[in-house]
Amino acid sequence: MDQTADDDDRTSLVGELITVSEAFEGSEEIATARDLARSFLTDVQAVHGLPVSSRAMGMVQLVVSELVTNARKYAPGPCLLTLEVQGGAVEVTVWDSSTALPAILAPDPGRVGQHGLEIVMAVCQSFQVNREPVGKRITAAVVLADDPGGDVAGRQL
């Protein structure tokens, strides 16, 4: 079943898959990428009835911010952000044109900066980096409803 789920054709529902994608070309668009993530997860909860914890809402926005920031900082040209809900998690995928794989540094509280991927890996259920024929694709998954107290974004159960 293919169905468009919003007016601008960015979000679609294909079978059980809920997804949204958008390209970003400037570093000033990082806030727009976070807004897209927040809006997407709000719709996942309100329209599709899936629980989204407050923690998941914040963590997905953090992961989007870190991955899009890195793509804009280290790769020429645009990057593509895709969010997909599958199996109780949201996969945040960012494609960029650089073939250089990210350097994932060991935790070092004395280091100033370059903690983004360290943070992403700490808050995600899974993390993958794949080389593509052009560039690379980084995917991180965040569980949607993981708060033990049943806290769901926007309401208490």
Image (cartoon, rainbow, N blue to C red):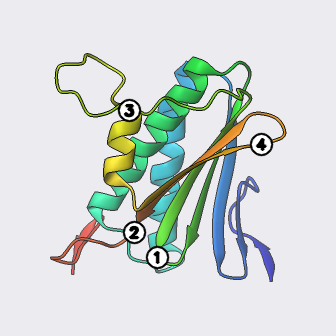
Task: Identify the element where label 4 is drawn.
Answer: loop
Give the mark, 3 or 4, whose residue is nearer the N terminus.
Answer: 3
Residue at 63% across, 70% down: 18
Q: Which residue is mark 1?
A: 88
Amino acid type, label 1: Gly
Q: Secondary structure at mark 2?
A: loop
| Image depth: mark 4 or mark 1 in front | 4
Name the residue tied to disc 3. Answer: 116
**Residue neighbourhood size for the residue with mark 1, other residues' Cα within 10 Å, grouped as few (<14), some (14–19), many (≥20):** some
- Residue ranking furthest to the right: 133
Q: Is residue 121 left or right of residue 34?
A: left
Observer-side mark, 3 or 2, equals: 3
Q: Are marks 1 and 2 in contact (CB under 8 Å)?
A: yes
Distance from disc 3 to disc 4, alpha carbons, whole Å, reads 22 Å
- Secondary element under disc 1, as helix, strand or loop, is loop
Say if residue 58 shows up in the picture: no
Q: Residue 136: x percent and y percent?
A: 69, 38
- Camera-near label (1 vs 3) is 3
Residue denoted by label 2? 144
Mark 4 lies on residue: 132
Helix, strand or loop at label 3? It is helix
**Going from the N terminus, do you reach mark 2 or mark 4 first?**
4
Q: CA gap, disc 1 to disc 3? A: 24 Å
C-alpha distance separating marks 2 and 4: 28 Å
